[in-house]
Image (cartoon, helix red, strand yellow):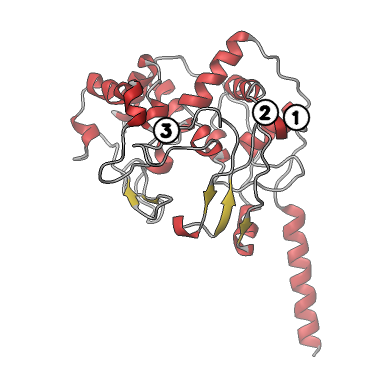
Amino acid sequence: MWFGVSLLLVLGVVAGAFFWIYPKIEPAPDIQIEKTSARLERGKYLVNHVTVCMFCHGDRYWNYYSAPNIAGTEGKGGQLFNRVMGFQGDLYIPNITPYVLQEWSDGELVRAIVSGIHKEGQALSPFMPYTIYQHLAEEDLYAIVAYIRTLKPIEYQVPPSEIDWWVNLLVRMVPEPYQAKTLPKKGSIAYGKYLANIGGCADCHTNLQEKGPEFAGGQKIILPDGSVNVTPPLLPDDEGKIARMTVEQFVQRFQSFANPARKKQKVEGSQTIMPWTMYAHLEEQDLKAIYQYLQTL
């Protein structure tokens, strides 16, 4: 009996220490981000074409190739990622329009984006890729927050997520404090690496299930209809398409999806998780920088 009581006490102390230590929370920075025209323009570009926030935070036409966004739903949230797609529970993407975020300070938004801490102090699911956004330069982070503030408010209550308890425990250990970074010189290989990082290229093009080499592809991604995408490699010495592309072909591959007709292209055969129509408006200089970076891998 006494052994059982002692064990419960020890477990209680360990559990208490765990919940005391995690998540690692620092106070939200006390800042007010100025909405300059340059900052808003940069934020719009990043949100829609680099970090592609609306990949999750907007509604999408899944019957069209690459599932382009439905205009007017930017920031609305509500997309469901569930067990059919390989998730441990039901994860609903939150509304990030001013309808909800008017209650958040700029500092709380900054902390959520790069450190994964909710306004109320809970750890956010790393499906919100704050571990990727840790790479954001401070000015780009501010630009994203400034632009999100300008989204049209959409009055929509997202259903609560229900995630398996053990996953919630693991999630508490993920957030880390953000270390401010500066922006690399535009057009440089370092800038290409920066864009690839904040764009999450490695997150999809790496086989995380089997801990494969970064950018070697092979990641299995389950789409809402249950079909499976296997991501291709991006390594220059591989037999994948990227290894056979010139920089001009690489740029053209992306820019071809800027044609409005591509947003109405019906799915024939298999759908793709790759958000071509969002990345289609990456600036040519940025695409070239990404290509040059991939050649160094």
Q: Residue at x 58, y 52 (%)?
A: 91
Residue at the disc numbered 1? 102
What is the distance, in whole Å, between disc 1 and disc 2 at their CAs? 9 Å
- Which image quarter: residue 117? top right
- Give the residue type at disc 3: Pro
Q: Nearer the viewer, mark 1 or mark 2?
A: 2
Q: Is residue 54 above or below residue 121?
A: above
Separation of marks 1 and 3 at Cα, in angstroms: 27 Å
Which type of secondary structure does the marked residue at label 3 adopt?
Answer: loop
Residue drawn at 78 percent across, 62 percent down: 16
Residue at horizontal 55 percent and vertical 14 percent from the top: 41
Residue at horizontal 51 percent and vertical 56 percent from the top: 82
In the image: residue 236, left or right of residue 83: left
x then y, percent, for residue 292: 31, 23
Q: Nearer the viewer, residue 251 or 277?
A: 277
Residue corresponding to mark 2:
153
Asked whether the residues under the numbered discs 1 and 2 touch, taking CB atoms below 8 Å apart as contact, a structural biologist would say: yes
| C-alpha span from label 3 to label 2 | 21 Å
Question: Above or below — where is 292 with respect to 113?
Answer: above
